[in-house]
Image (cartoon, rainbow, N blue to C red):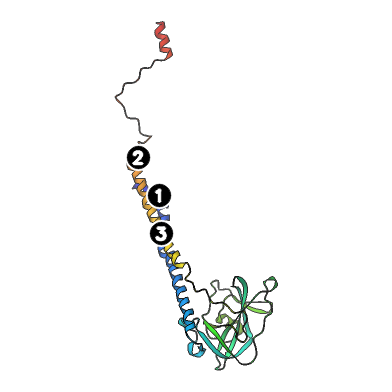
Amino acid sequence: MRFLFKPGWVAFVLVVIGFAVACYTLLAPWQFRRNAEREAQNDAIAASYAHRPAPLAELVPGPAPAPDMVWRQATVRGRYLPSDEALVRLRVVEGRPAFEVLTAFRTDEGRLVTVDRGYVRPGRGQQVADFAAAPDGPVTLTGRIRLDENDPQQRPPLTVDGRRQLYAADSRQLASVTGQPLTGGYLQLVDGQPGGLGVLPLPETDSGPFLSYAWQWLTFGAMALFGLVYFVRLELLQRRGGGPDPRAPAEPTDEPEPEVDTLAERYGKARF
């Protein structure tokens, strides 16, 4: 087994073991988590159809919605604050670029919430096209409760062509650019609501490929370990039962040396 300590074998063993460890501790668990998240999302969307819309104050009595309230339909009455608005950039809706419109909303109880009015398509040069402003006066809205998003890159808000723009649908960022003390989370409008724009579709409710991907990573890890054992065993067999070493001296034999009968010897015998 001393051959395993050679640099080539050491590198090979480390790569195979590292890959197998990654499969079992990172890649497969990651896919299992994504599958669990998708199942929880599907269950929440299905449950939202089983409950009638309820007042937002009842579903979200605290400063932010609880995770089990996500996708539930809530109603709220109050007024839009059209000047306290921002766009969420770099969105994709139904396979095409879009902006989402977040507008602050003051309820009749004095609570300030964020309303996602829907999406608008960009105009020429990917700039924001004109869209309908939020209506004045009291309105009653129905929407789905959503949690605040997080921008992984932590990019700050910016202003383009006089419009505030964000990189995530996040009430905290909208509060920072408008100065309004907005509560956490936001309300995503359903179809046919006052001030609504393009209706955001619900996520797909299929289970997705995550579970099969997880089992594939587990299989790949097992195959890598099996391959390592196979090649080590093959190397051992070749070293124990292989052919003679070409560098070893030839062993003597008892067979007599063949007589040499060259033309020169024949010539010499004939002459003398």
**Residue type at numbered disc 3:** Gly
Residue depicted at 45% across the width and 78% down the height: 43
**Depicted 70 relative to depicted 267: above or below:** below
**Corner quadrant of residue 105:** bottom right
Q: Which residue is tagged 2?
A: 242
**Residue type at numbered disc 2:** Gly
Residue depicted at 64% across the width and 92% down the height: 137
**Residue 64: image x %, image y %?**
50, 84
Which residue, as the protein is rendered here, is positioned at the far left? Answer: 254
Q: Which residue is tagged 1?
A: 9
Mark 1 → mark 2, Cα distance in angstroms: 19 Å
Mark 3 → mark 2, Cα distance in angstroms: 31 Å
**Residue type at numbered disc 1:** Trp
Label 1 secondary element: helix
Which is closer to the viewer, label 1 or label 3?
A: 3
**Residue 198: image x %, image y %?**
62, 79
Residue depicted at 69% across the width and 70% down the height: 125
**Residue 272: image x %, image y %?**
39, 5
Earlier in the chain: of badge 1 and badge 2, it is 1
Which residue, as the protein is rendered here, is positioned at the far front? Answer: 50
**Residue 238: image x %, image y %?**
35, 43
Label 3 secondary element: helix
**Depicted 15 relative to depicted 89: above or below:** above
Q: Which residue is tagged 3?
A: 221
